[in-house]
């Protein structure tokens, strides 16, 4: 069995290279995003709190796919968007990786698009840890929450939203309908995130945008 085929994000997806924001305005227009980073009134998909909603099933339910359904979607996918830290890239806020053998095994024989939304937006490695404040990723897109450095309180919301847009553009460019992302991350968490220093149920900024655009997101903890 061969391992995953990994796309080079700098050569095949230059707008996701660290420090390069890419052509943001056309991307926002394609996504139906207003200039302030939230969904435009005409095209927004709203959840119960006004933020981007989870994909609906044929009955109109907003319930997320079950763990079994998420894993099945991963198994059936040919191209998968993956948090680069899970592949062994030392891009975490603390300069380390979160290489996961379970993730690598699950991606065998698949085409992989490695992403780190935070690094793609130009944030350095290492960097101060960031928490969400005022809500989860859905609330950030609705303008009710922010992403701030845990110690200094510096607002990093714009950078985190830009990284999410680049991750979505990568998924759309390469045809990925499934994303396997790092749990608890303010960008990539899909079930739990840190909000005001406390671990709570919810999703990160990148996950919220991907789900609003129909991408199935699961975490390393789903495997």
Image (cartoon, rainbow, N blue to C red):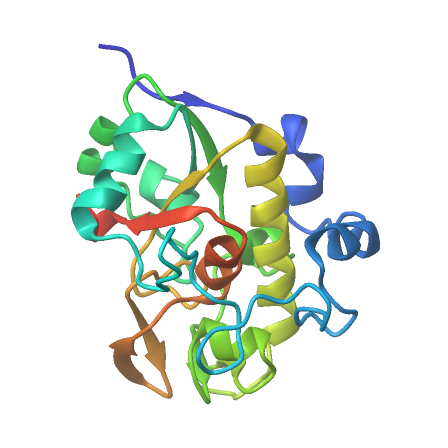
73 vs 107, nearest the viewer: 73
Q: Residue 217 at x, y = what percent? A: 37, 50
Q: Quadrant of residue 160?
A: bottom right
Q: Residue furthest top?
A: 1
Determine the residue positioned at 81% across, 48% down.
23
User: Considering only vertical position in the picture, is 113 above or below 164?
Assistant: above
Q: Quadrant of residue 186?
A: bottom left
Describe residue 51's horizontal placement relative to residue 27 as left or right: left
Tell me, yes or no, if residue 128 can be seen here: yes
155 vs 203, nearest the viewer: 203
In what quadrant of the picture does the C terminus appear? top left
User: Considering only vertical position in the picture, is 165 above or below 71?
Assistant: below
User: Considering only vertical position in the picture, is 20 above or below 79?
Assistant: below
User: Considering only vertical position in the picture, is 19 above or below 190?
Assistant: above
Q: Residue 171 at x, y = what percent? A: 55, 39
Describe residue 195's horizontal placement relative to residue 155 as left or right: left
Q: Residue 222 at x, y = what percent? A: 19, 49
Determine the residue positioned at 29% across, 59% down.
183
Describe residue 210's horizontal placement relative to residue 193 as left or right: right
63 vs 75, nearest the viewer: 63
Q: Residue 146 at x, y = what percent? A: 54, 82
Determine the residue positioned at 33% across, 77% down.
194
Describe residue 186's horizontal placement relative to residue 75 as left or right: right
90 vs 15, nearest the viewer: 15
Tell me, yes or no, if residue 90 can be seen here: no
């Amino acid at each position: 069995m061969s391992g995953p085929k990994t796309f080079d994000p700098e050569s095949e997806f230059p707008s996701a290279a660290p420090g390069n924001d890419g052509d943001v305005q056309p991307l926002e227009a394609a996504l139906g995003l207003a200039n302030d980073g939230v969904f435009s009134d005409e095209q927004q998909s709203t959840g119960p709190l006004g933020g981007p909603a989870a994909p609906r099933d044929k009955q109109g339910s907003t319930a997320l796919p079950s763990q079994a359904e998420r894993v099945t979607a991963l198994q059936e996918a040919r191209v998968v968007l993956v948090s680069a830290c899970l592949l062994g890239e030392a891009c975490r806020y603390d300069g380390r990786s979160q290489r996961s053998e379970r993730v690598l095994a699950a991606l065998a024989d698949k085409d992989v698009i490695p992403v780190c939304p935070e690094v793609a937006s130009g944030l350095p490695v290492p960097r101060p840890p960031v928490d969400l404040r005022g809500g989860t990723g859905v609330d950030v897109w609705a303008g009710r929450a922010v992403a701030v450095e845990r110690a200094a309180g510096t607002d990093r919301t714009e950078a985190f939203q830009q990284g999410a847009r680049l991750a979505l553009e990568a998924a759309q460019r390469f045809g990925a309908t499934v994303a396997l992302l790092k749990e608890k991350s303010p960008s990539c968490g899909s079930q739990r995130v840190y909000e005001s220093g406390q671990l709570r149920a919810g999703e990160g900024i990148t996950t919220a945008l991907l789900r609003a655009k129909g991408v199935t997101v699961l975490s390393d903890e789903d495997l």
